[in-house]
Image (cartoon, helix red, strand yellow):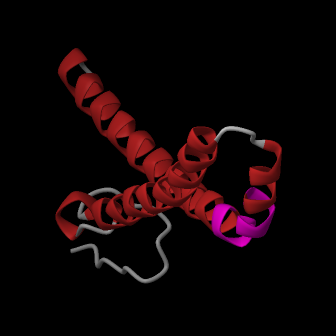
Amino acid sequence: MNAQESIVVLRKALEMWTLQNVCDGGIMLGFFVLALVAGRGYLESLNARLSLRVAIEMWETLTDFGADLLLLISALIGLFVTNLDIMADIKIAVPWCRWRCC
């Protein structure tokens, strides 16, 4: 293996590693959003500890907008990872996609 081939192999390995980590990060982000939405009652109970009205409004905005923003990012990561043009030559264990080797 010469230097040019090793550069190509390293580039493909880095691309595969990056996409696998992005896929795993999107899944973990989805679980984090699920925890935020499921724990909404607990987050609302923290409002009693906040004394300023501005702090309460900021906390409510942060929890509501934060969950929505994280859900949007998770959905965009999902669309990015399942894009077949990107995934055509990289094999990631995604059960609903099957490629045939020619």
> Which quarter of the figure has residue 68?
bottom left
- Residue nearest the observer in this picture, 52 or 65: 52
- Residue nearest the observer in this picture, 54 or 27: 54
- Residue nearest the observer in this picture, 74 or 60: 60
How many badges with numbers are in the image? 0
Residue 3 locus on image (x, y percent): 23, 16
Q: Main secondary structure of the magenta part?
A: helix
Placement of 68 over or under 99, stated as above or below = above
Residue lying at 56% horizontally and 63% vertically, measured from the top left: 30
- Magenta residues span 36-43
Q: Is residue 58 left or right of residue 6?
A: right
Placement of 67 over or under 100, stated as above or below = above
Residue lying at 33% horizontally and 40% vertically, measured from the top left: 15
Placement of 20 over or under 78, stated as above or below = above
Residue 6 locus on image (x, y percent): 29, 24
> Quarter holding the C terminus?
bottom left
Residue lying at 32% horizontally and 61% vertically, measured from the top left: 76
Q: Does residue 28 show up magenta in the picture?
A: no
- Residue nearest the observer in this picture, 6 or 49: 49
> Quarter holding the N terminus?
top left
Residue 78 locus on image (x, y percent): 38, 65
